[in-house]
Image (tube, grey):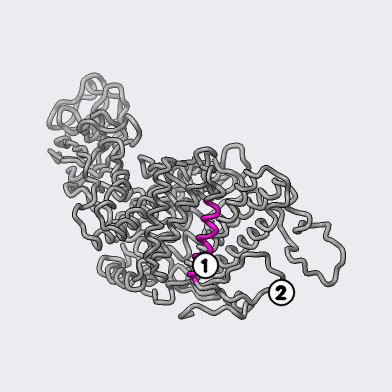
Amino acid sequence: MKRIWILAIALAGFSSCNKFLDTKPTDFYGNTNYYETEAQLQQSLNAIYSNLIRSELYGQVMGFNFTTTTDEVMSNRTADGDTRGLRYNYDASQVYVAGIWRYCYVGIRNINSLLENINKPEMDSTRRNIIKGQAIFLRGYYYFLLTHNYGDVPLVLRTLAINEVNIPAAPQKQVYEQIEKDMKEAEVLLKDYTSAKLGYNDVVTLTAVQSVLARVYLYWAGYPQHDASKYKDVITYCDKVINSSLHALNPDYRQVFTNLSRDQYDIKESIWELGSQGAAPGVPNKSGNDIGNFVGIQSAIVATDTSSYSSAAWVWVTRKLFDAYQVDPASTATPNKSSLDIRRDWNCANYIYSGNPRVKAARTSPWMMCAGKFRRELAPQSVRNINGVGGTYNINWPVIRYSDVLLMRAEAENHENGPGAAYPYINEVRKRAYGLMNGNVVKSFTITNQGSGYTTAPAIVISGGGGNGATATSVITSNRVTGIYLSSPGALTAGSYYSAAPTVVIGTFWTPGVTYAANTQVTNGGRLYTVTTAGTSTNTPPTHTTGASSAALTGAVFTYAGVAATATATITSGNEYELTAGLDQAGFQLAIRDERMRELCFEAVRKADLIRWGNFVNDMAEFAAYATGNGASVTATGNVNGLAGVRAVSARHVLLPKPTYELNLNKDLVQNPGW
């Protein structure tokens, strides 16, 4: 359920400068007649939260415009069709470049005003500290967004007069020091404020402060500051979160994002979310966002189809991401082998919806697969298709998850002490990724008889073995079953894991009393039959090996088609997830890079990761060469437009340009290099 962020009444007149009027305003709120009550403080704080989820920030831009052309996902837009900067074709005048800057400072301005008036109303001191702690953390967070996007930025810690416009940028190190100061003060003020007590996570709590501060230190340790002393702080703050016992991984990676789509809180896994307005049952929809739209699975609203939803899918995943997930080497599924890692088929969606009526169409080329993490098709019908019109799609944005804390802890440990003690943290993430947190799952299939005579791919039914929820599809070649694609290894909740290999049934067994349509294929006694005359089956199954059955005996007429295919299943042994043992420090760091991509793709951290690792431009050049040599440049099955965007990366793209409008106002501001 989403908490509603009620937009506070616009706070105007923050400056006391008024040379022409000598009367106090009576038709709007200013500092002299606002912040009088706890409710007004809370309204102001709510507006600061709401500012973060607006389209100029996390409602669209932060997870899309400048973060989605990397080695994990690329734009599929042509240069003429891209006005959003996806292909590194933006400049300092672009509206989305300006929006991040503008609305971060709007948030900071409102926070400064709130903090200056925090002691104004009479209220409980604990409640005052909670509001103050959230506000001062959010000021640090806004500055974190600013500095890792723009570098050196003006550091404004008070309400400015209307004529204070020329403010030089503070060096990034000084900005980081202020972020640290604000967040550490917030940690003290929020010492007993936890999501476990609240039951929701779309406000800043103690562990949200600690986990985000760990991320701040990780960025501070990397390029361009290279302050390696901060790795120890990463360890300290990750350990605070881990040792709190307030957080844990959800056993099913897919469920984390299903919960986000369905408006369900997961306070163990998701440490801090940005809440959208509305969507919860009984709560009026106020506004939505673009989460799951441009970075989502393609579909259009069809008025007569209440299951339809709207998603433009303006980015596609990369083969590098797809191939980063381990496959079952024994899999004979084509064209893509089954993966042992359940994250692959969730994140790299191998289908789209198209047409009217809407149909599900397969995507087999990884370069053309949609980013499947945020799935609007799982959202409540009332917010995705309202009388044939797109809804508000109120999916929360996961700012930081527990898996990120574990991976940060592993990276910092490796840097400080080598990989020895870092393995448990990355392996905990990998164990969940393979579905093995609480037991074993279906791993792979062996086809013991390919059969013959199949005209369509038969269904796969998996049963027994003590578990449930495993699903698979078959692949046929030349009328034989040549592969089985594992689409789900099983349900990953208590009591659903497999203690033994389940039974695999290929196709549909002949069943008495069932009405079969013409051309249906069924099996009986190891033989495959095709229904040539529709009808209801009798108690006498077909047993012949040539020709057609008698309608008098079998009801529907069955014609012998061939031999029924058979297969067996294998379950995991419990250790497939473990990272290769014995890596040196450099090798473990490379493993961390890949694991962060596999786990956190499309969550707006990959570009920032590549930058802090210090080789962004060369990394992207190497990826462009890889993409060219691995099919991205093929028009029919690649992503030519995205490849052109990757090739456009240069040194200036390490930072966004400072907005033109701001440079025109603030004469003390200096443009970033290359712009």
What main secondary structure does the magenta stretch of the protein show? helix
SS at badge 2: loop
Residue that label 2 marks = 163
Q: Residue furthest right?
A: 22
Q: Is residue 651 left or right of residue 56?
A: left
User: In percent of the image, x 53 and y 45: which residue is there?
Assistant: 191
What amino acid type is highlighted by mark number 2?
Answer: Asn
| Front one among 53 and 387 | 53
Residue 348 in view, yes or no: no
Quarter of the image holding residue 576?
A: top left
Type of amino acid under label 1? Val
Boundaries of the magenta span: 172-187
Q: Please give left or right for residue 131 compared with residue 332 in the image.
A: right
The reply to whether residue 98 is visible in this rendering is yes
To which residue does mark 1 refer? 175
Q: Where is residue 671 in the image (x, y as percent from the top left)?
A: 52, 79
Task: For label 1, count other residues whose C-alpha is less than 10 Å away and answer few (under 14), some (14-19) or many (20+).
Answer: many
Q: Does the magenta stretch include residue 652?
A: no
Rendered location of residue 663, percent (x, y): 59, 78
